[in-house]
């Protein structure tokens, strides 16, 4: 039931990536892994995303998953592309049952107590808290975590290098999702590697 936990514990930050083409994906993955971040979430927000997952898996040391998985069709396409874990912005019974049936590590998004309780009913105890800042920030997460002592989270959405340490200091947080590691515009591998090193060095 906690198959996702070892992946969540591999680093303090899971890069959340929106990638438009395979060559950029390879450069990004190589730079992130070189900087110490092995777990990479490729969001299914671009036409190239599945091909990017296939390509990134060839980078030594990379553990590549699919994010923005919205339904069973997305799930199966991501698995066929070689995704090693699945992240969803929300939690539905149909998608959860499919992920459990396919025995792939699964991290669904939750934003309130009802979401968490539905997840617990389905046998899950590890969740993405999303959208972290818009859903009330660290104060909201602490309030949610209090009644669910055995539940652990990966807050994602609006977190930065500057704010990440405060989130990571919370006992209920195993890691955070970060979209700040890859800037807009042309790929700059040196800048990405430097950002990854800073993120990988964050204490938990």
Image: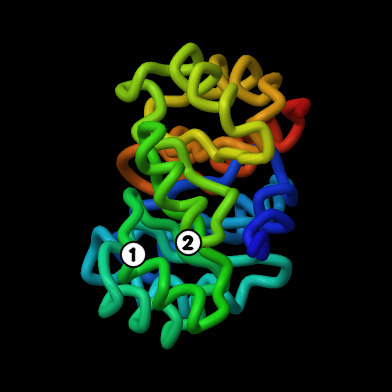
- Residue at far bottom of view: 80
| 149, 103: nearer the viewer | 149
In terms of image quadrants, where is residue 132?
top left
Coordinates of residue 32 in the picture (x, y in percent): 61, 50
Quarter of the image containing the N terminus? bottom right
| 192, 121: nearer the viewer | 121
> Is residue 181 positioned above or below 32 on the image?
above
Q: Secondary structure at mark 1?
A: helix
The answer to whether any part of residue 105 appears in the image is yes
**Residue 93 got which mark?**
1
* For residue 67, side relative to residue 142 (left or right): left
- Residue at far top of view: 139
Q: Residue at x 34, y 69 (%)?
A: 95
Q: How far apart, in angstroms, are the residues tagged by discs 1 and 2? A: 8 Å
Q: Which residue is mark 2?
A: 122
Coordinates of residue 165 in the picture (x, y in percent): 65, 19
Pointers 1 and 2 in contact (C-beta within 8 Å): yes
Q: Residue at x 45, y 74 (%)?
A: 99
| 92, 62: nearer the viewer | 92
The answer to whether any part of residue 191 appears in the image is no
Its colouring scheme is: rainbow
């Amino acid at each position: 039931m906690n198959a996702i936990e070892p992946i969540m514990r591999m680093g303090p930050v899971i890069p959340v990536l929106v990638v438009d083409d395979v060559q950029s994906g390879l450069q990004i993955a190589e730079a992130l892994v070189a900087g110490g971040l092995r777990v990479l979430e490729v969001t299914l927000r671009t036409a190239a995303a599945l091909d990017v997952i296939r390509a990134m898996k060839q980078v030594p040391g990379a553990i590549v998953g699919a994010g923005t998985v919205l339904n069973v069709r997305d799930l199966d396409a991501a698995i066929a592309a070689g995704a090693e874990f699945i992240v969803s912005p929300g939690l539905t019974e149909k998608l959860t049952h499919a992920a459990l049936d396919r025995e792939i590590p699964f991290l669904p998004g939750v934003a309130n107590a009802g979401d968490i309780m539905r997840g617990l009913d389905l046998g899950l105890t590890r969740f993405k808290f999303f959208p972290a800042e818009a859903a009330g920030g660290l104060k909201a997460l602490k309030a949610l975590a209090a009644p669910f002592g055995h539940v652990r989270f990966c807050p994602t959405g609006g977190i930065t290098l500057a704010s990440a340490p405060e989130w990571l200091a919370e006992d209920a947080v195993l890691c955070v999702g970060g979209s700040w590691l890859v800037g807009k515009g042309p790929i700059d591998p040196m800048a990405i590697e430097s950002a990854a090193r800073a993120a990988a060095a964050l204490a938990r």
